[in-house]
Image: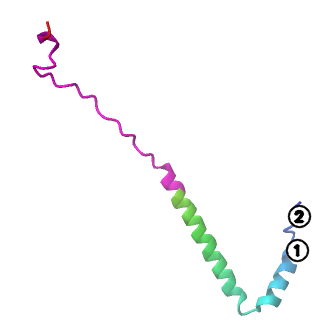
Amino acid sequence: MFEGLFQPMHLLVILVIALIIFGPKRLPELGKGLGDGIRALKEGMKDHSQDAKVEAKPDVKPDVKPTITPENNPENKA
């Protein structure tokens, strides 16, 4: 469907149409804004992927042996 969409002639026609619509003075401003937006998107994606790599440690309680008191001592229940 999109085969050959970005051939040099197609890109040239798109550039000419953009020059006609926006003019030669505004075109560099639009390009800079587009570049800044793409850069911000890449940084956001990179930050998100780094956050996803950080693994959360599960809440694992250490092995704790119960304290033996006179009430729960198995030797006293004879």
Image mark for residue 10: 1
Q: Identity of the amino acid at label 2?
A: Gly
Instruction: Residue at 84%, 68% (x, y): give it.
Output: 6
Across and down, in percent, residue 51 comes to 48, 55
Q: Is residue 10 left or right of residue 75?
A: right
Q: Is residue 41 left or right of residue 66?
A: right
Task: Reply above or below: 67 against 34.
Answer: above
Across and down, in percent, residue 21 comes to 80, 89
Q: Nearer the viewer, residue 54 or 74?
A: 74
Instruction: Residue at 15%, 21% (x, y): give it.
Output: 68
Task: Reply above or below: 29 against 57.
Answer: below
Say how many tags the image has. Answer: 2
Question: Is disc 1 placed on a helix, strand or loop?
Answer: helix
- Per the image, the residue denoted by label 2 is 4
Q: Which residues are magenta?
A: 49-76
Task: Reply above or below: 77 against 39.
Answer: above
Label 1 crowd (10 A; few <14 / some 14-19 / many >=20): few
Across and down, in percent, residue 45 comes to 57, 61
Which is the main secondary structure of the residues drawn in magenta? loop
